[in-house]
Amino acid sequence: MTAVVWFRQDLRIADNDALHQACANHEQVVAVFTITEKQWQEHDWAPIKRDLLQRQLNYLQQDLAEKGVPLVILSCDYFRQLPAELLQLCQKRGAAALYANRDYPLHEVRRDRAVNAWLQRHGMECHWFDSNLLVKPGQVKTLNGTYYKKFTPFFKAWLKVLDADGIDAPQSLAGQRPKINNVHSIELAGEKKNSAAWAGSEHVVRDRLSRFLREEVNQYKTSRDVPALDATSRLSPFWELGVIAPRAAARLLQSQSPDFPYGLNEGPHTWLSELAWREFYQHLMWHVPKLSYGQAFQEYTEAYPWRHDQSDFKRWTEGRTGFPIVDAGMRQLLQEGWMHNRVRMIVANFLCKDLHIDWRWGERYFMQQLIDGSFAANNGGWQWSASTGTDAVPYFRVFNPTRQSQQVDPDGQYIRKWVKELEQVPVKHIHAPSEYLRARGETDYPLPMVEHKDARERFISTFKGLKNEK
DNA sequence: TGCGGATTGAT
DNA sequence: TCAATCCGC
């Protein structure tokens, strides 16, 4: 009998439980990817993320063809049409079973539940796997039996699971299927933005990961905070599309400590904690449905009078705030569809705590621009910055953009790369150039759009009021 | 994964 | 005068 493997955010051959199980249990295997254009629009999928998805789908199709598995593309508008579409495909192909790896945001969970119910009703089996996370939502609980609301205890429990369960050995695809020779290129409709600088087949991405974990991860703890060095792994878009899986990463790290997941050097340990953050926010979103409806985790913060000023917001998006480090980050985002993570924190903090603009505006804009936009991580990050989240930064912790700039970009290299008007400004003035520029009569670069000191004080006093009323 | 003002103590 | 430290926000 034939099985259908439904690919979603798991565009990989290796470490793919759904694919491996389908191939182990069935002679014939057909892969399917479903395009749901309107649903993606509602989810604010960025044009550059779409473009990368298209490229990665073509790589996936090639890799699957090598293994003798054809990839079918189904296209419709919304998730709600998928039960009927997938049933029709299964029937047409004479398939009796569907295999897929779970996704955890609310719409995706509902989508899968509906598909499961509809297919079962028509006599098909559905097999679901948790291949995109090391620890699945609900698997770790506090002593009270609830989900973790703080990262640190979550991380400890998460490490304990890795320690106890170990990391599964790599699998190879079972069965011999004749190679498929004729593949046609896959094209997605809709607006796209060039992602060529990022794309790479699964094995290229895997090589990048393995080189990073061999050669660069030891410097990660300190160099990741220097945007000019760009010493992060730059793999985030591939995590989001599932081109790499956490098991692959964990297995590569395993060789670095006999006591894995303990006993790692601080670089790899810090990097592993970032994997845990990724899972923490996915678990959180699965446990707390209101996060998917644009609501704050801390309910009392909903009373904060966030501003909804279009023109100030636009200045932020365009990188014309007059704060060089903020503008550099926002311009990198516009041009590259990506921003260094340290700078993401600075620009998010600035939008919320200096401009007092609704964090949801920032969250949405990031999704619309980022090549690595992940609903859970992005929401978690914004609520962390805005102090509305669980285990968020305390409301009174307000970054001083000028001081942050001096700390993370001491010689102004990152600023000069992205803010061309400031290319010639000496280091002494690069972080707060308005006086220097005024003295020289240069007006290309905007004046600071807020007085940081006042904005900070107003944010803290208003937020403090809410907290006291709680 | 602060900041900024106040205090302290060495010079 | 200034760096180190403390503490409330």
Image (cartoon, coloured by chain):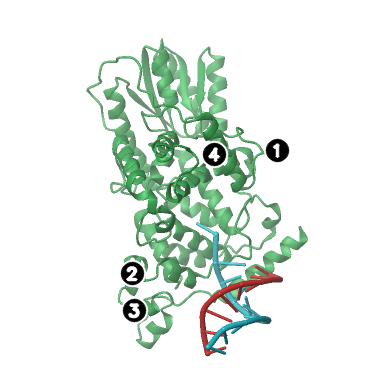
Chain colours: A green, B cyan, C red
Q: Identify the element where label 3 is drawn.
A: loop
- C-alpha separation, residue under disc 1 versus residue under disc 3: 56 Å
Which residue appears farthest toward the top when viewing the image? A1
Q: Which residue is mark 1?
A: A143
Question: Could you confirm whether marks 1 and 3 are on the same chain?
Answer: yes
Q: Is residue A1 left or right of residue A152?
A: left
Which mark, by number, is residue A159? 4
Q: Residue A106 lies in what quarter of the image?
A: top right
Chain letter of the residue carrying label 4: A
Q: Is residue A431 above or below residue A295?
A: below
Q: Residue A387 lies in what quarter of the image?
A: bottom right
Instruction: Give the residue type at disc 3.
Output: Pro
> Do the residues under discs 4 and 1 have CB atoms within 8 angstroms?
no
User: Looking at this view, is A241 or A265 the one in front?
Assistant: A265
Q: Identify the element where label 2 is drawn.
A: helix
Q: Earlier in the sequence, mark 1 or mark 3?
A: 1
Chain letter of the residue carrying label 1: A
Q: Is residue A417 above or below residue A244?
A: below
Q: Which residue is mark 2?
A: A416
